[in-house]
Image: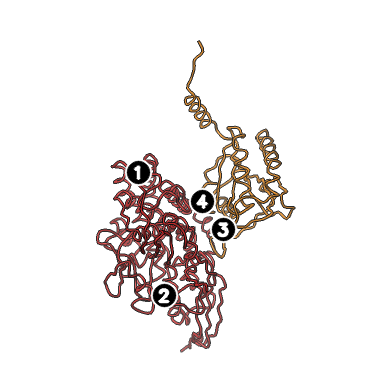
Amino acid sequence: MIPVFPAQFICWMFSLYKGLTKPLITLVAIGNRYMGDDGIGIAILDDIKERLSEDIAVLAWESKDALSVASELLEIQTPIVIVDCADMGINAGDFKWFKQSECSLEQHHNVISTHGFGFSDALVLAETLGFKQELYFFAIQPEQIDFKQGLSKLLKKNIDVMTQSLLEHLDKLKTRL
Amino acid sequence: MTMNTNLNKTMHIKIDHVTRLEGHGSILIDVEKGRVENLKLEIVEANRFFENLVKGVPPHDVPQVVSRICGICCVGHQLAAIKAVENALNLSTSPQTRLLRVLLNESQFLQSHALHLYFLAIPDYVGVKSILPLAGSHPELIKKALKLKKLANDFTTILGGRALHPVMPTLIGWRKLPDKNKLELLLERLHESVKDIEEMVDFISQLKLPDYERETEYVSLKHPDEYALYEGEIYSSDTKKSVPESDYRQVTNEFTVAHSTSKWSRWNRESYMVGALARVNNNFSQLHPKAKEVANELDIKIPCYNPYKNNLAQMIEIVHCTHHCIEILEELLSQDLHMEDLTYQSAEGIGCSAIEVPRGILFHEYGFDNNGVCNHADAVIPTSQNINNIERDMQKFVPQMLPDMEKEALASHMEMLLRAYDPCISCSVHMLDVQFV
């Protein structure tokens, strides 16, 4: 006789299994979907989160302040991949994968206002406090950052290419780990 | 005998944008032959017209819109608006809703005071330019401050649905009640935080604050039964009397000056102070006993006239709010939480409210027409009430310290003084009422 389990039980078992799986990588999307292309990280995460294997933990830091970001960085125990838009001086819609050591992030920790505290400042603060995880960036050059809901046409059009590339990079990174 | 040549000094100080505060402000000081010719705290932010944004909006949407005035005090703006709209529509609330609102408000005090005190103000008192050198020299302290801020953010999220611009509190009650299991975990974390906070107090007690005093009028809410943060009447240390919140315009008496896009306020004398120090001065006896112990440890004598000690008062309030929240959570967890009927009848009316937010008293007022649509809004923010007092503090400080301080030290003390008030300049410049012809 084949045992039959109710769907709820199977879901519960699956969530328990996912909960017990130790993540290899933490994927963090940063952005604000109400600021045009600044929401690209969150949009990519929405697009791929169901396709990720259970050994990739996922976090969305939407409109999170820098101190909370520093605090959460300190809690992460795996290599981290940040998905965010970044001004890299390349064509809008182009994207890059790079390690932290391959870039220099502008800092504003003595800024005019706390509104100017950004991810780079949070990272420096976390590092000062002992953060040592490997950090990778999947960065997308924005076309337009402004008070506006939704991505620009250009980024919207290219989102499938970006997500595919990100998935490939994540696979490669997992193999290396 | 030596002559103090500094008495004849001439200097020009212009700090274009004071760092480590919310928004943009500049300090201008001109000293000619030992005499202060000109001293201004210029507020240069553009007006934001929030009062006009809510015109035409239905009552239950008003609090959600005005929450956006500020990312730090969003809870305060939201609760002030909820209370004012309820007063306009004559709606009443249950004891359960009151308790939840008190908790939500105090979660914001913990979050905001931790941010300001440890990440913006303290670097001044240890002689460093930003949080990073402090994190390098005192990593465990800064980790504790980050932990407290995270706890406060999670606290707001559990009660309000999210840390920024909460969505659960609304007119009459809560759209979705907080999960009791999460409240129990929160209670545990608050208990655990007590030890960390004690260590933070130890550190603060060793700081050397500038020795400067200027007695002023201290204005805060006052409540007969509690340390007034959520509600109360408006109390003045000058008259030793309170007036109802509906008389707030007689208190604030807003006026404009040429060098500030923020309005100024005055009540019984040329200026007054709101915020942590005003509250501690006016309501010291109602602080939690643990907070009073900390006041002793920090050597605050009431009344305290040193504006730099506003930062110590913030530490006292962190202790007060932590213990008060523990007590309220225990009370709340001893009973069953129940969803309330949130339906209401919109009506014509006008109502105002006053609430203490981390930086001082916040006033909101809204009017609704006979279609139940908002047709009037007014908000008076703590920083706009403090700006006048800050400039007067500077006017006394500069001539007093001029003989012994060089230009750099003076400029740095002026920045520290402004920061000690924890100003939210962005918030302070949105209250211009525009009449279109």
- Within 10 Å of disc 3 (Cα), the crowding (few <14, some 14-19, many 20+) is some
The amino acid type, in three-letter code, at marker 1 is Met
The amino acid type, in three-letter code, at marker 2 is Glu
Marks 2 and 4: which is nearer the front?
A: 2
Q: Where does the image place residue A19, in percent across and percent down from the top left? A: 51, 32
- Within 10 Å of disc 4 (Cα), the crowding (few <14, some 14-19, many 20+) is some
B177 vs B180, nearest the viewer: B177
Residue receiving disc 3: A117
For mark 3, give the secondary structure: loop
Q: Residue at x 52, y 46 (%)?
A: A72
* Residues indicated by labels 1 and 2 sit on the same polypeptide chain: yes
Q: Residue at x 49, y 69 (%)?
A: B429
Marks 1 and 2: which is nearer the front?
A: 1
Residue receiving disc 1: B339
| Dots 1, 2 in contact, CB < 8 A | no
Residue receiving disc 2: B254
Marks 2 and 3: which is nearer the front?
A: 2
